[in-house]
Image (cartoon, helix red, strand yellow):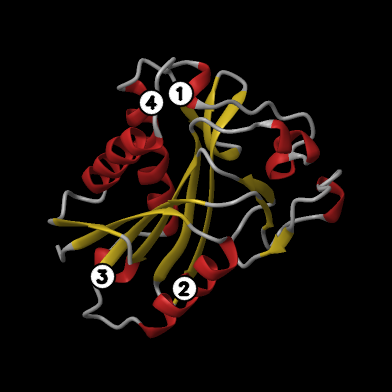
Amino acid sequence: MSELIVRSLGLQPYLETWEAMKSFTADRDDNTKDELWCLEHPRVYTQGQAGKAEHILAPGDIPVIPVDRGGQVTYHGPGQLVVYLMLNLSRRKIGVRSLVDVIEQAIVRTLADLDIVAEPRADAPGVYVGDAKIASLGLRVRRGCSFHGLALNVRMDMEPFRRINPCGYAGLAMCQVSDFVASVSIDDIEKRLTAQLVNGLGGPAVDYRKGW
């Protein structure tokens, strides 16, 4: 398996990151190493390709950006860990459904290490603690390569979720890691989750990098 680059990027603007994802995917070839981009975004709503305007209830001063991933509307903001998976699925011989399983189970194992019992749902992608959603997924595949990824709520202002129907579900309860663990940091969760993702992808050699 080829080496996997894991980038820790801190707070990054959404639009520029989205453009970088598209450029990376368009320009890559069979020799390009796969990458995981770990970051946070300033406050923004993103509306997936299946998104319906009625699920955006009262965005107020938070921008709404239509994007090319699957799924409906979701919210990103500081204190939420976002991981974009820039993977050559053809080279890895893995399909989209299998990748979704890898992501969901990596999140479940990460939370289990913190004594948080979580599970995916067959009828609604993502990871849940009881009836509340703690992590969302949205992927796009182009030329056999994935981009976009997951968002795990860690320690953030949850109010903006109440201005939308998260992932298109009216009244869907949202939760975060800090609801269950008194002391938690993005850095710690990032290390735990990337380790689980690497394990789920078959444990390739990893090159950890700060920044671009």
Q: Which mark is residue 118?
A: 1
Residue drawn at point x = 32 percent, y = 61 percent: 211
Q: Secondary structure at mark 1?
A: loop
Q: Which residue is mark 2?
A: 20
Mark closer to the chain start, 4 or 3: 3
Mark closer to the chain start, 1 or 4: 4
Q: Which residue is mark 3?
A: 91
Mark closer to the chain start, 2 or 4: 2
Residue type highlighted by circle 1? Ala
* Mark 4 neighbour density, 10 Å: few (under 14) some (14–19) many (20 or more): many
Q: Which residue is mark 4?
A: 111
Whole-number angstrom distance, CA of label 1 to CA of label 4: 7 Å
Residue type highlighted by circle 2? Ala
Query: Residue 173 appears in which quarter of the rendering?
Result: top right
Q: Secondary structure at mark 3?
A: helix
Q: Is residue 126 left or right of residue 31?
A: right
Whole-number angstrom distance, CA of label 1 to CA of label 2: 32 Å
* Mark 1 neighbour density, 10 Å: few (under 14) some (14–19) many (20 or more): many
